[in-house]
Image (cartoon, helix red, strand yellow):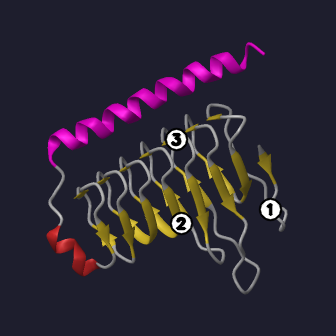
Amino acid sequence: MIRKNPRGDLPIVPESAFVDPTAILCGRVVIGENVFIGPYAVIRADETDAQGNIEPIVIGANSNIQDGVVIHSRAGTAVKIGEYCSIAHRAIVHGPCEIGERVFLGFNSVVYDCVIGAGSVVRHNAVIENCHLPPGFHVPSTTAVHSDHDLETIPRVNPDVTSFSESVAVTNLALVKGYKKLQNEF
């Protein structure tokens, strides 16, 4: 469902993107080309800052926002998700937040008030907040990172983890084409 926020902003969705009919996109949301937005995802840009402004939630081209993902931001702050990112089932991305290109966020992961560098992998059930995760980092499942200081114990991404992330992105790009084709049958 595409809908306005109380301020009157409408999402921008290109023809090449696929948004599942059960997903909700509300407000100042900008979706890139060939993006997949799965069932029951919620992307809301509806909270204003003290001056009534809202920064956009931007999803980069060729990214996938999987089933049950929630993306929101507080007090008009921005969320930017780079190109070729995979945001896995039931993850929460809460702004202010910036996620670089080719990032993988695992099932049930939570990111808030942070920057995640390009090529990083945040595995399942991890929590990342109040930090700048450098490019190419791997955050193991169930790890909690609450500050830049916590990053000293996190290992760098190994090639096996990165190849898994790439395969998820490729699979979801194929889903965009498949679902767009089905969409035209009705």
Mark 1 or 2 closer to N-term?
1
Q: Residue 5 carries which label?
A: 1
Q: Is mark 2 on a helix, strand or loop?
A: strand
Q: Which percent across, then down, holds residue 67? A: 55, 41
SS state under label 3: loop
76 in magenta:
no
Tag 3 residue:
66
Count residues near mark 1 (Cα–Cα under 10 Å), then give few for <14, some for 14-19, many for 20+. some
Structural distance between the alpha carbons of marks 2 and 3: 16 Å
Q: Judging from the image, what secondary structure is the residue with disc 1 in?
A: loop
* Image-based side of 186 in relation to 114, left or right: right
Magenta stretch secondary structure, dominant: helix
29 to the left or right of 79: right
Residue located at (42% from left, 46% from top): 85
> Looking at the picture, which amino acid does disc 3 mark?
Gln
Which quadrant does the C terminus fall into?
top right
What's the magenta region?
158-186
Instruction: Read off the residue under disc 2.
Output: 94
